[in-house]
Amino acid sequence: MRNHKLPVALLMLAAALPALAGPKLTAEQVLDKHVAATGGRAAYERIKSTVTKATAKLAAQGIGGPMEIYAKYPNKMLTVQTLSGIGETRQGYDGKVAWSRDPLQGLRKLSGPEAELVARGAVFNTQLNWRKAFPKVAMLPDKKINGAACYVVKLVPEVGKPLLQYFDQKTFYMVRMDMTFEGPQGKMAIETTIGDYRPVDGVKVPFSMRQKIGGAAEMVVTLNSVKNNVPIDDALFAMPNK
Amino acid sequence: MPANRRALPAALAACAAFGALALTPAPCIAGPGLSPAVRRSVFDTIWTKIRDKYFDARMNGVDWNAVRLRYRPRLAGLKDDAAFYGLLQQMVGELKQSHFGVIPPDEYLAEDERAGAHQAGVTGITARMIEGLPLVSAVEPGSAAADAGVKPGWEIVEIAGKPVKPVIDAVMARRKLTETGKRLQIRMALGARLTAPVGDSGAITFRTPEGEAKVVEVERRRPSGEPVRFGELPAMYTRFETRKLASGVAYVGFNVFMMPVLEPFRKAVAEAAGAPGLIIDLRGNPGGIGGMAAAAGSSLTTVQKSLGTMRMRAGAINFVMFPREDAYSGPVAILTDELSASTSEVMAGGLQDLKRARTVGGRTAGMVLPSMVERLPGGIRLQYAVADFRTPHGVLLEGRGVQPDIAVTEARADLAAGRDPVLEAAEAALLRATK
């Protein structure tokens, strides 16, 4: 009996190896499967604008407030966020100019990597249109996130730091994203855990995000509502005069 | 909807919101006891949070695992909550850094169901060590102390029947403390002893410069100013003052870096255009919202510059001043003392390093670590540092403070005569600079 055990075990291991490794997917394929898993190209393409209402909380510190995000095809975006004790911050991109207005630093026209970052974030349906923001993509070694095996895709922009997206190998939902903020204020790692996917007009949208900022603060963003194809005046995205 | 679309303003606002406030310890008032399980949970939460989030992964050279092993067994023998808070304070104190502290729930009573049972009342007296004596250095106009006839220059001998000398002797005996550290500790200790529930009237015994003993009943009143809350910090009251001195020099002073003072500050600085100088009084200002140092600095610069950099575990953030159109371009002096801490030091140290302002008065507290305050089980709050701070030329201000460009030694006679030698020195320096 003893003599038989080792060869049998080796045989089983050898048989299991191809299954463990799985078929090799390219980064493009993973991104395509993510689109398919969350609703499919046609469902995404039916959406031309989105108004999202959310709540952002630095829960542990007792700071937070409402957040509204307006997005419009092909690349317009406005985020309005209010933090208790600080006030209202607006950040926008009208397709040409990236800008920010907050109670501490006032109105600023953004430039360099900071502006590029906002412009990339404004690309509508980035899941579908990632090529507009990231000329290069590549696969990184798989990683486990909360016990689930994930594909890791590196998306490289023309200007600025790469973005890492983690996709659950079973569901192809994105479960984590790592990015680096770059601007005059410096560089800061932002790790976002993504979950609570819910269908909205045929597309599955993550309603929960937990952001670890600079390895210190933790911000939880919870979506309250997502409305698609709401008419939005382009003027909303333009940089204000003051 | 890509997640990165939502990340940016939130992340920046979160960093701007890091507090940089040196909190004053307050006496613990007995409340319902925490269960042993809650105490263990709080202990473990604090130890783990600091392990995971303190900006220095090497824990300032302290063996943090050994600290846990040494302190946790002591939980079993604690007689009450006060002893528990003391143990926690001692544990976080092992790191030997500012901005680590455990705030008992009593600090927050005003907002709890026991509201009104206890609210910190103040006298309006600023008590500081001058000429080796605990003196009344200032009396707030309209305060209870002012109404009771208390005068600057008086020595504080007893508070509520207890002599202050033993408190002072205990601090002075601490050899490792710097002179500034001793002055700060005594100031905080006297401040805590002068604080009592609103409505209380405790007797304070003074000695006048002429040697006469005076016993004065001083009521404790709600602090003046606009109440403001920021996250888990205890309630604060913002006070702001601006005026033009006889020489034409503009004066601006505020007691804490909270948003309600930002617009008045900007307006006052804009109105100082054409003045021969601008004085910013940060004496007694323990800090507040970290991002406000750069925001205020934006009113003083015509080119984009950074006051310095805070380093976290995963990234570094510059305190960038984005110039404002109405920025003041004349000479600036910043007044400092031993209780100018945290955000005050970021502003004073950064502008000094950039040679945009001269600092006048005394060395600052040397407590300059951006921090967060979190609520824990039992209503306890933990303050812990998440970043360090260095000036544009890389000077670490923690433990060092801002050395004044013009050091001013205050004298009891000046106080008694109603003079402010620090303000006078700053005004004279600004007028010399514009000649």
Image: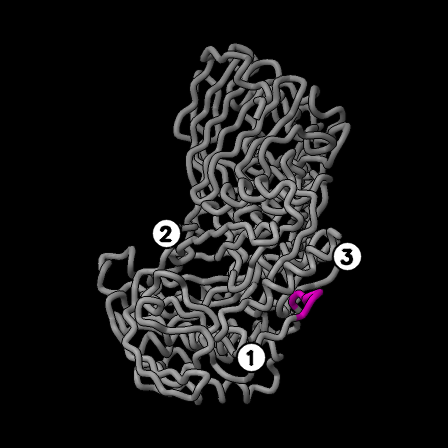
Q: Quick one: label 3, few (<14), some, or many (20+) residues within 10 Å?
A: few
User: What is the secondary structure assignment of the residue under circle 1?
Assistant: helix
| Coloration mode | one colour
Task: Report the residue at 56% width, 53% height from top.
Answer: B245
**Residue B30 falls in image quadrant:** bottom left
Q: Please tell me whether residue B51 is drawn above or below residue B351 in the rendered image.
A: below
Residue B212 as seen in the image, left or right of residue A33: left
Tell me where residue B296 appears, x and y as whole percent: 59, 46
What's the distance in space between the residues labelled 1 and 2, CA to CA?
Answer: 30 Å
Tell me where residue B268 appears, x and y as whole percent: 54, 44
Task: Report the residue at 27% width, 65% height from top.
Answer: B198
> Which mark's residue is nearer the viewer, 1 or 3?
1
Instruction: Give the residue at mark 3.
Output: B393
Tell me where residue B139 appears, x and y as whole percent: 42, 67
What's the distance in space between the residues labelled 3 and 2, CA to CA?
Answer: 37 Å
Looking at the image, which is closer to me, A187 or A170?
A187
Q: Main secondary structure of the magenta part?
A: loop
Instruction: Give the residue at mark 1.
Output: B182
Looking at the image, which is closer to me, B35 or B378?
B378
* Magenta range: B401-407
Tell me where residue A230 appears, x and y as whole percent: 45, 13
Amino acid type at image mark 3:
His
* Residue B227 marker: 2
